[in-house]
Structure formats: C-alpha cells, structure tokens
Image: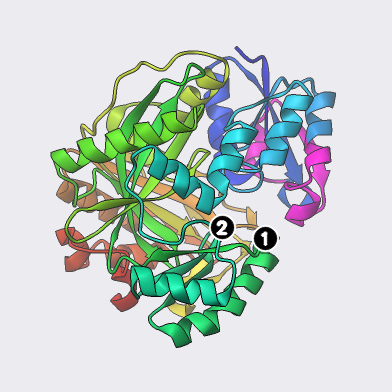
Amino acid sequence: MFKKILIANRGEIALRVIRTCKEMGIATVAVYSKADAESLHVRFADEAVCIGPAASRDSYLKIPNIIAAAEITNADAIHPGYGFLSENAQFSRICQENNIKFIGASPENIDAMGDKASAKQTMRDAGVPTIPGSDGLLESLEHAIKTAHEIKYPIMMKATAGGGGKGMRVCHNDDDLTDAWETTRREAAAAFGNDGMYMEKFIVEPRHIEIQIACDQTGKACHLSERDCSIQRRHQKLVEETPSPYMTDELREQMGSAAIRAAEAVKYEGVGTIEFLVDADRNFYFMEMNTRIQVEHTITEEVINYDLIKEQIKLAAGDPISGRNYYPKMHAIQCRINAEDPFKGFVPSPGLITDYHAPGGHGIRVDTHAYAGYRVPPFYDSLISKLIAVAQTREEAIKKMQRALDEYIIEGIKTTIPFHQKLMKDEQFKSGNFTTKFMDTFEL
C-alpha cells in the first residue's frame, strides 16, 4: 500500500480523497494555487505545496510543478480527482516515467477511450451497442453530408476530443450541417487542440444513464449499478440519482453486462464509468467512457455502502476486486450546489461566503470545501458543494432532500439552492418521467 499520496486537485474532491487516505493510514500532500491558499484541502492535508498562481494553466494543469511537488515530498502516488489532469494520458505517462503511481487509468486506457471515434469502434468490436454514426472521423463537409443521409437526420456533430458539451451541434438538415461544419471544428480546436469531428444519430429525448465499474490489474471487472444523470443543462449535470426511476431489472442486467464487456475490452484498471443514452423503447447506446472518479460517485457509495475512493486506491496498489456486481439497496439523490445565479441564466457568482450552515440529520451527506469566510475564486468550476439525500424509497429521498435544501444556508453569494428547491417540488420530476430535455421547459 502507498505511504504518501499527493492529490493533484482542489476543492471538495481533494478534501474527499484526503479523508479516505487518513482513514487508510496514508499520508497526504495537497497542492494549491495562490488563489486556494485558504481552502480546506490545504488545511487538512499533512503537507501542502503551492504550485503556482491562480490560473489553472499555471498551477493545476502545470505537470512539471505537480511532479516536482511529488518528488520533494516523497509521494509515491498521485490521485488526480476529476477534471484538470484526471484524464490526461501525458500526465499518466509522466507519472509512470517518474515511478509515481497514477491512481487512475493507464495512458493506453486514456488514449483509447479519450478519442471518441476510436472508442466507439472499440465498443462495437466488444459487442456493446453504439449509436449509429460515422465510421471514424469525418474527412470533409461532403463526407459529413453523405453520412448524414445514410443514418438520417437529426444528427449530432461531435468533437472526437470533446467533453463538457463543447464541440457538439445538433443538425436537422443539410443547411444546419453546412453551418455547423466550420463552427464546431473551430470550437473543438480552441477547446481541445484537436478539430477532428465525427457524427452520430441524434437520439430524441433520451435518458442519460451511466454504469459505475471497477476493474483490477488482472483485467477482472464488476459493475456497481447505475446512476441517472438526465437532469442537465447544456450537457452539464445538475442532479443525479440511483437507482434510475426508468430502470428495469432486465435493463440493469443488460447494461451492467455491456459495461463489463466495455471495460474488459480495453483491459481497464481502476474505477470508471460507462455512459449510455437510453431511448424511449429502452434501447441503450454507448456514449463514452470516463476514465476517472466522477462528481456523482457519492450516490453509488451511499446505496451500496462502498467507498469508491478507497477502492480506487486499493486497485491502484494491486488489490483484486471482490468480483461481484452490486445493486442499489436504497435510493440516493445528489444536488450539485454551484456558486451560480439560477435566476440569471446560471451566471457564475464568485465572492465571499459571509454565512454558512450545512444541513444534517439522518440520511444527509454534504461534501464541500465551503465555510463562512471562504472566498469562492472566479478561476475554476463553480461547484462548491454536493448535497446527498439517502432513503428507502425515491419518494422519501425527495422529501429528505427538500428538507435539507430548506436548512442549507449559504449567504454572500448566489447559489443554485433555489433551483433545486423548486425542482424537488416539480410534479414531472417527482413522477420520474423526464429526459435530458427536461430543462428546456423547466421554469424557475
């Protein structure tokens, strides 16, 4: 087992990893930018190293600075959290070259699954259902139009190196596609340094359901059931829950088996997620694989009593998985509390938190790095807290979440708490009958 782990991240996920390391008797090193000097992950780590100024490119994305911090503190492993360098194959490779264990996917796994076009072909070869689309990257506008006619509109243009909703455009006819061809390529090049595009059939009003997987170094995999992430805005998740209200026992078995095939096809190691779109007839299609821990891992932990960060660390150290699949025994919902103003188009709201009171009680979990007197910096993702409610049934979990949201006090900045309060009372949401298009018609 590792003696010391450096956490190459910030905020609530860095604090989350530190807590598990302490429980495992592993020393921790926090890295931080000058903007994060007062963050809780810095305060609670055993050691802390400043790695640069506020801008991510000069700190949390600066690989030489992070490796140097690991070397001077004698860390033998690095946990990347999510975002930043968590799915960066070069970072994973450099860790290997410096004899530091990267607690995440191998460079080969990240390369294989990070390129969406090649990942799709890999899944197809493994017998995992995929969305009809282009056979590899699109070579020209003419090639794109020809492919669109073959799979039939509507289609989705996607950047092969994309993520977070960037480099994506729905097209309903040739004119839409012609307009989108140059704009999506430029957007992809600017965001990812790669203008490669591919095309998929656009699934109208799907559910976004993902399967959590865990795989050991022998290539053995198991799944930890599903999470429903259909409540999202501009491809950014807002609320997640497990089990999905749309799921059936038969569909869970089918999707779980497909996720295991997907993981074993690339000889995956560690914890990861296979994301699917599920249509109105409960057909499911591979969308992408996330080769890291996810923001919403918390709800899976709560319903199966399984510490996924601990499992990540153990798998990276060479321990075997239990070899059995897990299924939800409870119902859990997570609301992402962002420093954003939901009444003004979710515009970021950084600044000083003047008053803070977290909810409590049975079945309530709060993962956060926020506190009274903490200044939310404007340089990073706006997520400041994750509020999780766990109960025997979905109805009880929603009621518990309503109560917790009413208790949650964060003053001095705007947050998404009012949005979640209204969502939890929305009849369509409470019915479980919603798709990824839910937010198109939801009004505050």
Q: Does the magenta stretch include residue 62?
A: yes
Query: Which residue is drawn at the image coordinates 45% and 74% (left, top)?
Result: 146
Helix, strand or loop at mark 1: loop
Q: Decide if residue 329 is on the left or right side of residue 269.
A: left
Residue 152 percent location from the top left of the image: 33, 73
The answer to if 311 sits in the magenta stretch is: no
Start and end of the magenta stretch? 38-66
Q: Label 1: which residue?
A: 194
At x 31%, y 70%, the residue is 437
Q: In terms of sequence position, does the residue under pointer 1 or pointer 2 come before the other?
A: 2
Q: How far separated are the C-alphas under marks 1 and 2?
A: 8 Å
Quadrant of the rendering where the C terminus is positioned: bottom left
Which of these two is toward me, 338 or 178? 178
Give the answer, above or below, for where 74 lies relative to 7: above
> Which residue is identified by label 2?
160
- Across and down, in percent, residue 136 comes to 52, 56
Q: What residue type is labelled 2?
A: Thr
Give the residue drawn at x 50%, y 13%.
Answer: 319
Measured as percent of width and height from the top left, residue 28 is found at 67, 25
What is the number of the mark on residue 214?
A: none
Q: In this view, does 157 lie above or below 160?
A: below
Q: Nearer the viewer, residue 340 or 76?
A: 76
Q: What is the crowding at mark 1: few (fewer than 14 residues within 10 Å), some, or many (at least 20)?
A: some
**Tags 1 and 2 touching, CB below 8 Å:** yes
Residue shown at the point (23%, 38%) measured from the top left: 254
Percent coordinates x, y for residue 383 in the rendering: 53, 55
Seen from this angle, which residue lies furthest bottom? 175
Residue 295 in view (yes/no): no
Task: Report which quarter residue 48 is drawn in.
Answer: top right
The residue lying toward the viewer, choosing from 225 and 261, is: 261
